[in-house]
Image: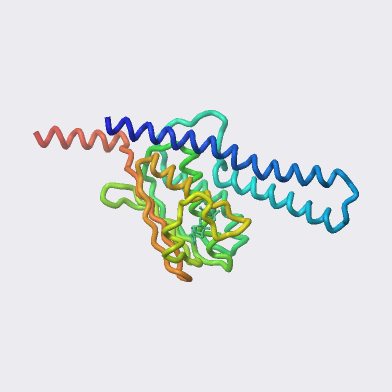
Amino acid sequence: LRKRIIRAEKMEAVSHLAASISHEVRNPLTAARGFMQLLEQGQLSAEKRKQYVQIAIEELDRAEAIITDYLTFAKPAPESVEKLNVKTEIERVIDLLRPFANMNSVEFQTLLAPFNVKGEREKFQQCLINIIKNAIEAMPNGGTLQIYVSIENGRVLIRVSDTGIGMTKEQMERLGEPYFTTKGIKGTGLGMMVVYRIIESMNGTIHITSEVNKGTEVSIYLPLAQSWKNTIANEQEKVFAT
Ligand code: ADP
Ligand code: MG
């Protein structure tokens, strides 16, 4: 019974996420449309026109940021849970974010191992994007972004560390709270909430440490998906043990 309840909660979390996206994107789009309509009416001073155009652009940027935090890889069809190679998935996300990292003079250093985990590919990539993007944004004057994969206590560990601005204790406590952002109009405060939900749905955990002006370390622990070789090895062990 306990298991079933947990599953139901997860399903709810996922459908709630889908419902909130359309709501989140619609608000800034409606605002942008409203200001465009005002512009259409003429008799506006040049100053007002400029101001309304600026607001409309900001609202469209906000819609874009929300889509980036939620839907970078989303496909219309529902996803299925499959075996994912963490090295392959991390490499794909690095390729996608490399231009953004270059713009910020951020250098990637990676030590990746090809362990398998189970999950929905696009959600897992979305989660990596949100964490890596935060790390890059924490280093506006450049820095090093390290991504390290290993096995710890039988679980896959993915560690993303940056040499950025870090977080205070208060900021750490609010991390993952919807709309908590220190990035003003450029932030959505939705990225980490999405990360927590996705990792939870993959039966994983997150551990974060941070120091102001030193940097932040995000460690994700996920169950190791057994490959058929592991399964055979385990079965043989059982046979020998009896
Ligand atoms: P957003 O990036 O839109 O602000 P997030 O949910 O992704 O929203 O992050 C929330 C807040 O957590 C950020 O505004 C920032 O203050 C803090 N944060 C997250 N990751 C890091 C990091 N690697 N370094 C410093 N601060 C971070
Ligand atoms: Mg973010």
Residue farthest to the bottom, as pictured: 213
Residue farthest to the left, as pictured: 242
| Residue at 80 percent of width and 42 percent of height | 37
| Residue at 38 percent of width and 40 percent of height | 202
Residue 13's x, y, as percent? 44, 37
Q: How many marks?
A: 0
Residue 103's x, y, as percent? 62, 60
Query: In the figure, 66 relative to 47: above or below?
Result: above
| Residue at 52 percent of width and 66 percent of height | 143
| Residue at 79 percent of width and 56 percent of height | 51
The one nearer the camera, 189 or 128, is: 189
- Name the image quarter holding the C terminus: top left
Colour scheme used in the picture? rainbow
Q: In this rendering, would 137 be left or right of 201?
A: right
Residue 174's x, y, as percent? 45, 57
Query: In the figure, 148 relative to 239: above or below?
Result: below
Q: In this rendering, would 236 be left or right of 149?
A: left
Residue 144's x, y, as percent? 50, 64
- Name the image quarter holding the N terminus: top left
Q: Quadrant of residue 24?
A: top right
